[in-house]
Amino acid sequence: MNIKRWLFTTNHKDIGTLYLILSGTMFFIGGMLAMLIRLELFHPGLQYFQPNTYNQMITIHGLLMIFGAIMPAFVGLANWMIPLMIGAPDMALPRLNNWSFWILPFAFSILLSTFFMAGEAPNFGWTMYAPLSTQFGPPSTDFLIVAIHLLGISSIMGAINIIATILNLRTPGMTLMKMPLFVWSWLITAFLLILAMPILAGVVTMMLFDRHFGTSFFTAAGGGDPVMFQHLFWFFGHPEVYIMILPGFGIISEIIPTFSRKKLFGYTFMVIAIASIAFLSFIVWAHHMFTTGINVYAQIVFMYTTMLIAVPTGIKVFNWVATMFRGSMTFETPMLFALAFVCLFTIGGFSGLMLAIVPADYQYQDTYFVVAHFHYVLVTGALFTIIAGVYYWLPKWTGHYYNETLGQWHFWLTAIAVNLTFFPMHFLGLAGMPRRIPDYALQFTAFNEIATIGAFILGAAQLIFLYNIIMTIRGGKHASAKVWESSHGLEWTVPSPAPHHTFQT
Amino acid sequence: MTNWNINLTQGVTPVSHDIYDLHMTIFWICVAIAIIVFGVMFYAIIHHRKSKGAKSAHFHENLWVELTWSIIPFIILTLMAIPATKVLLHMRNTEHSDLTVKITGFQWKWQYEYLDNGIKFFSNNNTPFDQIYNKSPKTADYLRVVDKPLVLPIHKKIRFLVTSNDAIHSWWVPDLGTKQDAIPGYINETWTRINKPGTYHGQCAELCGMNHAYMPIVVIAMAEKDYEAWVIQQKTGIIPSTPAVAPVKTTAPTAAPPAPAQKMTKEQLMPLGEKTFNGICAVCHQQTGEGMPPTYPALKGSKIATGQLPQHINRVLFGKMGTAMQSFKDQLSDEELAAVITYERNAWGNNTGDVVQPDDIKAAKAKGPLPE
Ligand SMILES: [Cu+2]
């Protein structure tokens, strides 16, 4: 294999593959950290790790899963599928595309190398709240800041590229309202990235200045405010949440019609719903900060805007169910993950609605109820859509069907384990267990044991996924161009595997 | 004795009851929506499958259906928002309080200051290291005990002023329905009114550094006359006759009677120093004195602990700005300070042979902080 081909490639399929490989690698490293975290929490008392090490693990786990696993996976899928779906020969800016990707391995090397520095890795949580990160953070915090800048540059360039591709390279006749929903969801996500990532870059730069250059943006003694950090961080952070789920909505809107053998219900409303969610995502950020002492009328406004998100999200769920209704369904692995997504993401939506109720949030905030909520949204939400998408498009990429039996095993083990892991966390939070603690009172033992057992099954099940992918790349039943009985769209008109160059003019 | 508690506490305050009611209302609304949506979905999964010969229908849009399922959720949400807003306005209203307690978060302990009567003390985690490190069996109150709990009267509106000395903490007692972030440099207000005497547990809810898990909160709520007796006892050291509730054990320097100045021997100082060090200092500097550099420096063989004595006393008494090293001059008694410094200068092979007397501490306090 020629290393230079991968280093200098400007081909959207190659770069898509690179993104997916990086994402898979980060997913397994982040997953390993998750299992070490669960190992420590199996029993009360300090078993394997010092509290400081534990705090480092939760910090890096969060950063890796968000920036390393979920986001690059969606960008990888976008690279592979958007040109195929809109009939474009490649991305609009192929060299930029190469650079967007190749920044990432360096960024994550820097991030992971912090474990080996004096003072060890950042230990203040992925949210990096000041003054814990500014005044009390280890020296490696500066490397984290550099890594985040690199990730931000990569994301913004990737987003520009996706917008340029979608707006300029659609095949004649494909108007905006004829685009596949995956393309729509990514167009909107790309705008979110361009609007949100610079805020993150700004806030980590302010951190850097507070740490080394004598400013006090986040220190009261110098006229600053620690809560200002949270406002800025969540002004980025909440759109970021939707950056991690909107492309998933797009994937599900492709898969459910295919395996229901029925056209997607309410296309126009689905597009409007994604756009409304994206808009609302910029005016709800303070719901992460209800207990910081912000003004009561601000709390009320943010409670209302947050609750409002349930309306477009509800439309999406109702429309997916309406698509299935009176369809002719089959249950291949991508469909199973899509159906599990609809159920379990909705549960994450419900807990999100509960968290929006400010008085109740005073009890939920910073507990395992929140941990349960965002893992339902990000694991059974975002991650399930990625897994569904990989199974769905793998025959198109490799020219082979994956092993369906292994796929089913992977699904059922994952679906059971994920609930075993995260459902008890609702109970733990309601019973009073705060998040981000390596040790807990005895009353929380039972559900922590269950969660840990679930996490290990969940981790092991992903090895089946990895094995299945590798075996599919190597061989397997040959796939036709159409791959699925009822697939629709331009990507299913090119042969499987998709040739290196498609739709050339 | 396994605990399978799965729901939020109803708590012992009007606010915690209101929160519980809101929590259950929104929960049952979610359950109802779930039954309808998942019901339809599973109906389709069971009946509209290809293996059963289902042929797919051709409908793919219907404006009225879509408007309906946009508007109905909106109406449900509006109905939910009304009681939530009412409760919120009530719980944020701190006016007309009977008593004010200032709560300050420290890495990693709480300080309580009763602004109406001048009582002020620290509340430390009281679970021994041996239990945390699994060297001795964990008692039922593992991570649920402090050396000195917060004592409050029932049926009084108590205003809390919450702030922090270092990182952000969050003071949370579920049974009180009270959670308030402690922001360094700012003061947040909240309040409670406890209906029932009892002991209520909580802990720090916001990641505040290494020992975030070890900041338990214990609140003892008692009838007003018992509370008054407790106040008198705190201020005078005298226990009024026939207290209804056993007096809280007090070791705080503010309550201790002034000890006559006397020379202590090294044999007296070292055990007291070790106890104080392991209870207060070891959370950062570790029982081995090796610390966790660079954030928490080692004391074993360190410049401060083996160098000039006045510098060492100065650091312990007045702390170091911009670091986690706090000022301990008001947290510990002169005897404890003398003992802990003596211990630090002679433990772990530091063998300086120095012995510090309570009088040395008094003198250093009187002189004030040394120039940097
Ligand atoms: Cu704390």
Image (tube, coloured by chain):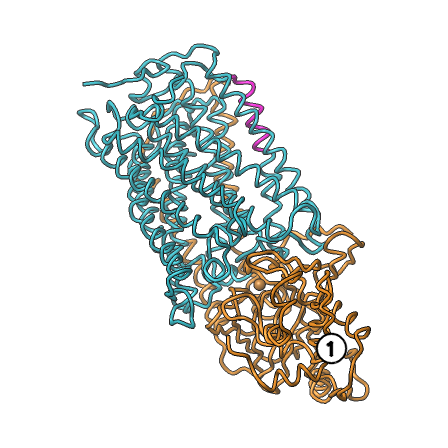
Residue A185 lies in quadrant: top left
What predominant SS class does the magenta segment belong to?
Answer: helix
> Is residue A412 rendered magenta in the image?
yes
The relative height of residue B262 versus residue B81 in the rendered view (above or below) is below
Q: Quadrant of the C terminus of chain A?
A: top left
Camera-side residue of A21 and B139: A21
Q: According to the colouring, which chain is cyan?
A: A
Is residue B225 shown left or right of residue A486?
right
The relative height of residue B160 versus residue B5 in the rendered view (above or below) is below
User: Which residue is at a point 72% across and 89% down the rendered structure image?
Assistant: B236
Q: Could you tell me the amino acid type at mark 1?
A: Thr
Is residue A346 among what the camera can see? no
The relative height of residue A468 versus residue A124 in the rendered view (above or below) is above
| Position of residue A200 measured from the top left corner of the image (x, y, whole percent) | 36, 51
Disc 1 on helix, strand or loop? Answer: loop
Q: Identify residue for label 1.
A: B251
| Position of residue A149 measured from the top left corner of the image (x, y, whole percent) | 36, 47
Residue B338 lies in quadrant: bottom right
Chain under disc 1: B
| Position of residue B306 measured from the top left corner of the image (x, y, whole percent) | 65, 67
Give the quadrant of ligand 1. bottom right
Colour of chain B in the image: orange
Is residue A124 shown left or right of residue A100?
right
User: Which residue is at a point 82% across and 73% down the rendered structure image?
Assistant: B267
User: Which residue is at a point 40% across and 27% down the rendered structure image?
Assistant: A255
Is residue A44 among what the camera can see? yes
Q: Quadrant of the N terminus of chain A?
A: top left
| Position of residue A75 measured from the top left corner of the image (x, y, whole percent) | 36, 34
Residue A246 lies in quadrant: top left
> Is residue B169 rendered magenta in the image?
no
Range covered by the magenta-colored residues: A403-416
